[in-house]
Amino acid sequence: MKNNEFLFSRKSAPQRSARMVETIYGCKWSLTVYQLLANNINRPGEMVRSVEGLSTKVLNQCLKKNVDFGILEKREYNELPPRVEYHVTDFGQKFIRILDELEALQGEVSEHFT
């Protein structure tokens, strides 16, 4: 083999998905929002009423991040009064499963290093 022939190229972390995980874990409410959605609480007002300490402003910021990443979709209904609901996308289901795996891994790490 010649010196300038390489079998492998340098592998780097997947930038966008790594940033998504970091952003979601950095948002202290995203995991709570996923829990609410899993329990069929998908309207913002109901979410705020269901979680002590969660404000409308912070929830809206959290929901926007999740919609921008494609984890959640926002459904707006043309009704009076206006109705908005959030739902997990197919991509979001995959992403949440990965977060669940990270949580399980954290449990194993905690057991191993205690």
Image: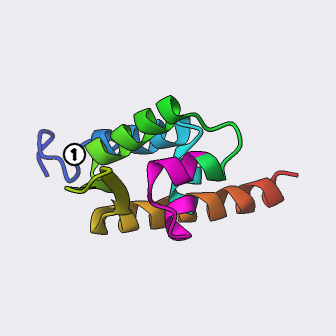
Question: Is residue 22 part of the magenta span, yes or no?
Answer: no
User: Would you say residue 11 is visible in this rendering?
Assistant: no
Left or right of residue 81, residue 45 in this image:
right
Q: Residue at x 59, y 38 (%)?
A: 28
Region rendered in magenta: 36-48
Q: Residue at x 78, y 54 (%)?
A: 110
Left or right of residue 91, residue 5 in this image:
left
Q: Residue at x 24, y 56 (%)?
A: 79
Up the image or down, 88 lies above or below 8; here it is below
How packed mark 1 is, by other alpha carbons closer than 10 Å (few <14, some 14-19, many 20 or more), is few
- Colouring scheme, one of rainbow, by chain, secondary structure, one colour: rainbow
Circle 1 SS class: loop
Horizontal and vertical percent position of residue 26: 53, 35
Question: Which quadrant of the figure has residue 13?
Answer: top left
List the residue tagged with mark 1: 9
User: Would you say residue 45 is visible in this rendering?
Assistant: yes
Q: Residue at x 52, y 63 (%)?
A: 41
Q: Nearer the viewer, residue 106 or 52?
A: 52
Residue extending farthest to the front is: 80
Question: Is residue 38 part of the magenta span, yes or no?
Answer: yes
Residue extending farthest to the right is: 114
Q: Residue type at mark 1: give it.
A: Ser
Q: Nearer the viewer, residue 83 or 10?
A: 83
Horizontal and vertical percent position of residue 88: 37, 63
Q: Nearer the viewer, residue 96 or 78?
A: 78
Q: Nearer the viewer, residue 18 or 3?
A: 18
Horizontal and vertical percent position of residue 34: 51, 58
Left or right of residue 40, residue 13 in this image:
left
